[in-house]
Amino acid sequence: MAKSTPTQQVVNGIKPGALFQPIDAIEQGPDVSRFNFRVENSWVNGAHNRATVNEYHGAKTTHRRDKTYFVYDMDEPPVLLGEDRGAGPVDYLLVGLAGCVTTTLVYLASARGVSLSRVDAELDGDIDLRGMLGISEDVRPGYQVIRMKLMVEGDAPREELAELVRLATRRSPVADTISHGTSLQVSLG
């Protein structure tokens, strides 16, 4: 059962009352719930790419980060013909999964008034390069399996923390995208 939490109280760095404001707005009209996230990527050299995250559209408005935007350098390790100028794209997928499940968990715990003292995640995944290299059509190019272990501590019983982990994994947009697949539409510009 959810704990009652005063609106102004801060739990895990979040004002739980503020979590419900978007829900109220979305219930007034589902157009507010639709978001479009955007990334621009440019090849630099070899396996080195640079992606920029700046704009997104949400709550019926396009938002542009005027002063701060995010730049991600991607590369491959030398064994995969890169020069280690950044984490690899498959690493960023794991990073995105860890961040999304963690944030979802923190929001859910905060809404229930559960104070967390620790949320750490360890992830690893298996890829067989025969798929990417076209050596075997029977092998997927992507991850065959991803394992995620969450270490969560807080003022709730272990059973409630386990339920929060289960819910966070089910409600995380990135976990959903990975576990249920998403339509990918690619075109030549």
Image: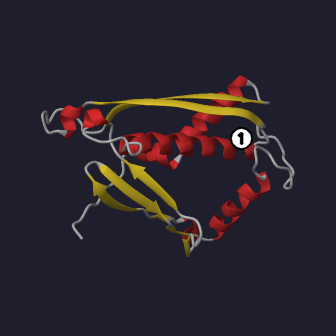
Q: Residue at x 52, y 66 (%)?
A: 34
- The N terminus, quarter of image: top right
Whether residue 4 sits left or right of residue 173 in the image: it is right
Name the residue furthest bottom.
61
Q: Which residue is mark 1?
A: 109
Q: Is residue 119 above or below residue 25?
A: above
Residue closest to the eye, 53 or 45: 45
Q: Position of residue 65 (x, y in %)?
A: 57, 69
- Kindly indicate the quadrant of the structure image that contains residue 43: bottom left
Residue closest to the eye, 87 or 173: 87
Q: Residue at x 54, y 38 (%)?
A: 169
Residue closest to the eye, 62 or 45: 45
Q: Position of residue 182 (x, y in %)?
A: 36, 51
Q: Residue at x 16, y 32 (%)?
A: 138
Mark 1 is surrounded, within 10 Å at the Cα level, by few (under 14), some (14 to 19) or many (20 or more) other residues, namely many
Residue closest to the eye, 185 or 39: 39
- Disc 1 residue type (three-letter): Ala
Whether residue 89 sits left or right of residue 62 in the image: it is left
Q: Position of residue 71 (x, y in %)?
A: 47, 58
Q: Regarding mark 1 in the picture, which secondary structure is present there?
A: helix
Q: Position of residue 120 (x, y in %)?
A: 62, 32
- The C terminus, quarter of image: bottom left
Q: Is residue 16 above or below residue 65?
A: above
